[in-house]
Amino acid sequence: MTAVSIADRWTSGPTVGERLLLSAMRQWAALRSAGEHPTRLVAQALAFRASNRTGGLFVAWMQSVEASLRRPIQVECPACGGISTDEQRLMVSCGLAGTATGAGEALLEPLLVDSQPTMVLARALNAALRVDGYPLPVRLRDGPTEPVTVQVTVH
């Protein structure tokens, strides 16, 4: 399995937790683009929706991402509904943080110089989101799934 295969394949639409994370990332990017400091505003928005812990961990996670970027993050227009590859890499790696840290690090390799600190924070953010009722799925598949046929067991 390659990091590209993980990012390119969505099994279904984003979950509520992923939409919350995506919204926070886009708000962060919009505030940065406007020349504003996103820390307080994004943390407050997440604290309102989830918890203070989630807001604080998200800020630390994004600061870690920004500190290690190889290039600017590509963010698609929120109005079009599309999720950029960079956004997918960040969301999927955060979902993988609790169970497949190595896969998450590999997924972030094209985006970050050093993904280990980011993955440590992603694991904490993932746990906080889960506690707050916004679990992130572990999107880790090798290939397309085939329909499973149920076979009756004969005893």
Image: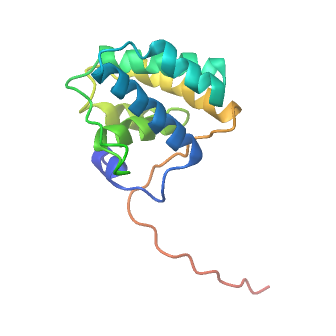
User: Relative to 8, is 95 above or below?
Assistant: above
Q: Position of residue 127 (x, y in %)?
A: 62, 29
Q: Is residue 50 visible?
A: no
Q: Is residue 126 left or right of residue 24?
A: right
Taking the spot 34% from the left edge, 51% from the top edge, the residue there is: 80
The residue sitting at the right extreme is 155
Q: Position of residue 88 (x, y in %)?
A: 37, 43
Q: Position of residue 41 (x, y in %)?
A: 50, 18
User: Relative to 120, is 153 above or below?
Assistant: below
Q: Is residue 142 left or right of residue 127?
A: left
Give the quarter of the figure containing the C terminus: bottom right
The residue sitting at the left extreme is 71
Q: Is residue 7 left or right of residue 122?
A: left
Q: Is residue 82 visible?
A: yes
Quadrant in which residue 66 is drawn = top left
Q: Nearer the viewer, residue 111 or 1?
A: 111
Taking the spot 64% from the left edge, 80% from the top edge, the residue there is: 150
Q: Nearer the viewer, residue 32 or 143?
A: 32
Taking the spot 41% from the left edge, 56% from the top edge, the residue there is: 10
The color scheme shown is rainbow
Taking the spot 39% from the left edge, 57% from the top edge, the residue there is: 142
Q: Position of residue 99 (x, y in %)?
A: 54, 37
User: Relative to 33, is 132 above or below?
Assistant: below
How many numbered dots are placed on residues in this image? 0
